Amino acid sequence: MTIYRGRFAPSPTGPLHFGSLLAAFGSWLLARHAGGEWWVRMEDLDPPREVAGAARTQLATLEAFGLHSDAIVEWQSRRSAFYQAALQRLLEQGEAFECHCSRSELAANGGIHRACVGNTRRADPAVRLRVAEGTVVTFEDQLQGRFSQDVAGEVGDFVLRRADGLWAYQLAVVVDDAAQGMTDIVRGADLLDSTPRQILLQQALGLPTPRYLHLPLIVDGNGRKLSKSDAALPIDADAPLPALDAAWRALGQDPASLRGSTDAASLLAASVASFMPSRLPRAASLSTAALHNTTDTNAV
Ligand code: GLU
């Protein structure tokens, strides 16, 4: 019986950067530490945002780093039928509805949807999940502690299928995490505020809620998310050791334990042997400046 199964689920919007490596390595370490499995899933749901070749490059980089998936890599672009089935169920249950609101109508409401205001029917309605007034979701994050969100007030009815016909991340991730039997979701803290929506969807679909652990988001000296800033340098697939070593430190681990590792495989073996989850930084973000300036991790 598998008691721990985790995953790394990149979107192919560019090469892996240091922040994505942290999520990959961190989720891998936690899975291995628990004696569990670690799977890779490609979240290629959004062709307009996709960069040609990025998925293959990401997978090649993970391989070069010795981070091998325990299962064949699943591609979300091939799983529409499963998302459609989940959507159909939510529509039939009356929990999802077609939304004919225009962008400007939504903008007038601060982007938050509570009730359809439009009088005109669109040929291409989005489909949203109804979030009842007063819906607050609280969960215990394994690292960040208790997290609570007023989903009705802060998010509103959220999109499951977009007006352009593309599947929303929230629906696909919930369907796939359950279909793949994921017990533990480890990812960056930028997704902390997506988790309550995912828990609502799990409840609506009768799916189990996995454990969640959100690692600190890596930000640049100005506090901007790495992937959105100039510091989003791709990591070098030809030189895994420095990047893995930097990620190890960012995960709050003892730099001394990896000394003497000569290749990715020996570094990973040493890392599993000395990984201490209790040293993971309990911070929502970590600055690259702090990582450069110290030998140990500084939470910001
Ligand atoms: N594909 C998402 C991303 O790259 C991550 C999804 C997840 O880990 O839940 O931001």
Image: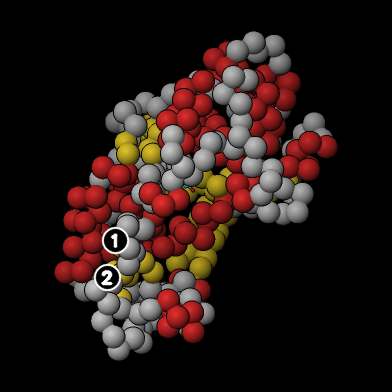
Query: Would you say residue 6 is visible in this rendering?
Result: no
Query: Would you say residue 223 is visible in this rendering?
Result: yes
Dot 1 alpha-carbon crowd within 10 angstroms: few under 14, some 14 to 19, many 20 or more: few
The answer to whether residue 298 is left or right of residue 29 is right
Residue kind at label 2, given as amino acid type: Asp
Coordinates of residue 8 in the picture (x, y in percent): 45, 38
Coloring scheme used: secondary structure
248 or 106, which is in the foreground?
106
- Splitting the image into 4 quarters, where does residue 1 fall? top left
Residue at disc 2, secondary structure? loop
Coordinates of residue 51 in the picture (x, y in percent): 46, 42
- Splitting the image into 4 quarters, where does residue 281 fall? top right
Q: Is residue 32 above or below residue 124?
A: above
Coordinates of residue 35 in the picture (x, y in percent): 44, 26
Q: Are marks 1 and 2 in contact (CB under 8 Å)?
A: yes
Residue, far left: 92
- Splitting the image into 4 quarters, where does residue 12 fall? top left
Residue at disc 1, secondary structure? loop
Coordinates of residue 182 in the picture (x, y in percent): 36, 41
Dot 2 alpha-carbon crowd within 10 angstroms: few under 14, some 14 to 19, many 20 or more: few
Q: Is residue 20 above or below residue 208?
A: above
Residue kind at label 1, given as amino acid type: Gly
Return the residue at label 2: 124
In space, the residues marked 1 and 2 are separated at their CA atoms by 8 Å
Q: Is residue 259 above or below residue 220?
A: above
Return the residue at label 1: 165
Q: Is residue 60 above or below residue 95?
A: above
The answer to whether residue 146 is left or right of residue 281 is left
Whichever of labels 1 and 2 marks the residue nearer the N terminus, that label is: 2
